[in-house]
Amino acid sequence: MTATKKYILAIESSCDDTSAAVLCHTNVLSNVVATQEIHKQYGGVVPELASRAHQQNIVPVVHQALAKANIDKKELSAIAFTRGPGLMGSLLVGTSFAKSLALGLNVPLIEVNHMEAHILAHFIEDENKPQPTFPFLAMTISGGHTQIVKVTDHFTMEVLGETLDDAVGEAFDKSAKLMGLPYPGGPLVDKYAKLGNPNAFDFPKPKVDGLNFSFSGLKTSILYFLQRETQKNPKFVEENINDICASVQHTILDILMEKLQMAVDQTGIKQVAIGGGVAANSGIRARLKEAEETLGWQTFIPKFEYCTDNAAMIGIVGYLKFEKGKFTDQSVAAKARYAIGS
C-alpha cells in the first residue's frame, strides 16, 4: 500500500442484513450483503434469529469483502462499524467483531450512526451521479425511521421532523400483510401499484403538526376498510389488489411529499436527498423527479444498492471521520437508540 491510500473496512449489522465493504477513500471496492431469508416465514424480523444469523454470516462476509477488494486485512487503515440505531442483539455482533478486529490489527476504530450513513451515502464516489452541496434537506425513509433532516455539513445535522409512531417502511409492510402479501411486503405494494389506479380508493391522511409524521392511524383505516369490503365480497382483495396497492402507495407518498414541501418552504433549501430502504420505491423516485420540474427542486436519489442496509454507506462515513481523526476507543458499546447528531 502506498502512503497516500487509505483503506476502510466497514461493517453493518443493525437489523437483518450482514454487510461488509472495503473503501479506498470515497471509492467502493467491494460491498457484500448477506440477506437473512429465515424471517420471511415469520412475517417480520425476529431479533433473536437475526443476531444468530449475524454470528454465522459475519466472518464469511468480511472475508468475501476483503477478497473482492483484493486487499489483505493488514493493509486496512481503520475499521468502521454501525454503533446504532437498530436491534441490540444484531448491533452487538457487529460492534464486538469490529472492536476485536481493530484491536488485533492495531488500527483505529470508527463508530457510525446508521441514519447519518443513509444520508452520507450520497458522497460515495460515482461519476454518473452528482452529489448534493451544503446545506441540503435529507428525507430518511426506512422500515424503522422516517425523518426530515437539515444537513449543514458532513457532521452537522438537525432533525426537523420525524415519525411520532410507526415508520413509513412499516406502514408499507403492515399494509401488505393486511392484504395477505408475504414479508417484506413494501416492494410488492410498489410492484402492484404500477398496475393500479391510485385514485380508486380514498384513505384519510393524518393531521400532524409541523414536520412530524404519523402512520398508525392510516394503517388502522386500511385495516377497517379491508375488513368492511371483504365482508361484502370475500374476494375483494384478490380482485382489487392492484388498485388497493396503488391507492395505499399514493396516500403514503402524498404524506411524505407534503411534509417535504413544507420543509423546503420553511428552510428555503431546494436541494433534497433521500435515503433508506423506502428510497428504492419507484413511486417516491418518480414524485421527486416530478418536483424537479414543477417546483424547481434539485433532487438526489441513491443507487438501489445504497438504499437498503449496506456497509458501503458505513464506509463512506468511516472515511470522512478518518480524515477528521474522529476515532472511538475499545470502551464503545452498541446503542439501540442513537439520535442523529448525538
Image (cartoon, rainbow, N blue to C red):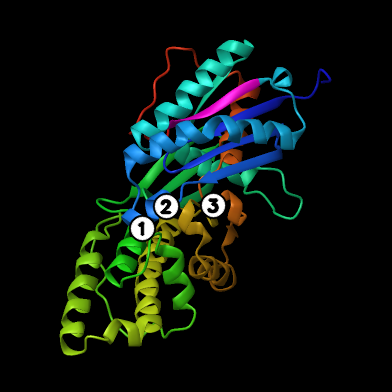
Categorize mark 1 by other alpha carbons within 10 Å: few (<14), some (14-19), many (20+): many
Front residue of this view, candidates 59 and 25: 59
Tag 2 residue: 142
Q: Secondary structure at mark 2?
A: loop
Does label 1 or label 2 sit earlier along the sequence?
2
Categorize mark 2 by other alpha carbons within 10 Å: few (<14), some (14-19), many (20+): many
Predominant secondary structure, magenta span: strand
**Residue drawn at (41%, 41%), measured in percent from left and top?**
15
Front residue of this view, candidates 143 and 140: 143
In the rendered structure, does residue 212 fall within the stretch colored magenta? no
- Say which quadrant the C terminus sits in: top left
Specify whether residue 211 is in view. no
Residue 222 in the image: above or below residue 34: below
Give the quadrant of residue 262: bottom left
Tag 3 residue: 307
Residue 341 in the image: above or below residue 122: above
Span highlighted in magenta in the image: 78-84
Give the quadrant of residue 324: top right
- Say which quadrant the N terminus sits in: top right
Residue 175 in the image: above or below residue 342: below
Q: Amino acid at mark 1?
A: Val
Does residue 75 appear left or right of residue 180 in this picture? right
Work out how far the residue at label 2 is from the one at label 3, CA to CA, in angstroms.
Answer: 9 Å
Looking at the picture, how far across and down is residue 339, in whole percent? 37, 35
